[in-house]
Amino acid sequence: MIGIVPQDTILFNESIFYNIQYGNIQATEADVHRVAKAAKIHDFILSLPEGYDTVVGERGVKLSGEKQRVAIARTL
């Protein structure tokens, strides 16, 4: 399997959890956490006041440089 993550990735104006789970809508909470850890973004997400419930803003503008890692987790 091959996954592609473009440099200018598109995220939905939804939670980080939703944006990661979008890659597999049947993924469990444990699955989402596992791929976030693999993408090296789990600790960053936990440092946010709302954690996985943090809304990323239109096209991920609230995440700055971390939106590619969210996209990597979504791909995984």
Image (cartoon, grey):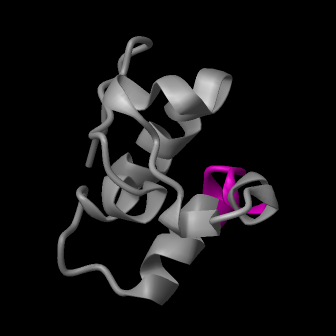
x 42%, y 39%: residue: 71
Residue that lies at the very extreme toward the left in this rendered image: 25
Q: Which of 16/24 is in front?
A: 16
Residue 67: x and y in percent read 52, 32
Can residue 5 be seen in the rendering of this structure?
no
Picture coordinates of residue 18 (x, y %)? 32, 62
x, y percentage for residue 37?
Answer: 67, 64
Res 17 quadrant in image: bottom left
For the point 68% across and 51% down, which residue is it? 41
Magenta stretch holds residue 39: yes
As for residue 40 lying within the magenta part, the answer is yes
Q: Quadrant of the C terminus?
A: bottom left
Q: What residue is shown at x 55% (from left), y 30% (from top)?
A: 62
Note whether 60 is above or below 15 in the view shown.
above
Which range is magenta? 37-43
Q: Nearer the viewer, residue 40 or 49?
A: 49
- Image quadrant where residue 42 sits: bottom right
* Residue 17 can be seen, yes or no: yes
Q: In this view, does 60 lie above or below 45?
A: above
Residue found at x 34% / y 25%:
59
Horizontally, residue 53 falls left or right of residue 57, namely: right
